[in-house]
Image (tube, rainbow, N blue to C red):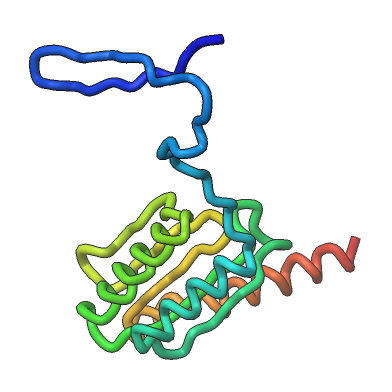
Amino acid sequence: MNPILSFTLTTSTAKIKPLPTGNTENLNTQTVRDELTTNQLQQLVVSSLEDFKATDIQVLDVSGNNPLTERMVIASGNSTRHVKSMAENLIVKAKSEGSPPLGVEGVNEGEWVLVDLNDVIVHMMLPQTRAFYNLEKLWEASADHRSGASSSV
């Protein structure tokens, strides 16, 4: 059986010494958190957005329409600064819960910030940007098109 090793790095050398064998209960070990379920992640997102006073929060279930994600959350902010702060708060909360974003886009501009949390994709936008792109209508039309196409076959 190999003993557990401890090491200390310095600028010139690395010192390696075996730890005592036997009781290892008091060793500091990093535990792996269980991943959040889609519903827990959605709840975290909505709670974070509510905490930072996002407006018109919409949750879309896109699991049947999109192979990349289960839910999309769309919310509005009053200014670019507000949208950025909502995104930054969400990123901090997601990381603290063990679900760091896979990607973040648009945080520098703040007009439309996308945070990809894998099972939940979050769009935070200015109201005029949201009205222009109208993602809710796009996904509704996509769902209608798919259901219409499948019923005509």
Q: Residue at 60% of width from left, 67% of height from top? A: 71
* Residue 77 located left or right of residue 115: left
- In which quadrant is the C terminus drawn? bottom right
Q: How many marks?
A: 0
Point out the image quarter for the N terminus: top right
Looking at this view, name the residue that lies furthest to the left. 12
The residue shown at (48%, 72%) is 45
Residue located 46% across and 60% down the image: 97
- 85 displayed left or right of 53: left
Residue 96 point in image, percent of width and height: 40, 60
Q: Is 105 left, or right, of 23 in this rendering? A: left
Q: Position of residue 18 (x, y in %)?
A: 37, 15
The relative height of residue 35 versus residue 23 in the rendered view (above or below) is: below
Residue located at (50% from left, 10% from top): 2
- Could you say where residue 5 lies in the image, as x and y percent from the top left? 38, 18
Can you say whether 54 is above or below 151 in the image? below
Picture quadrant of residue 136: bottom right
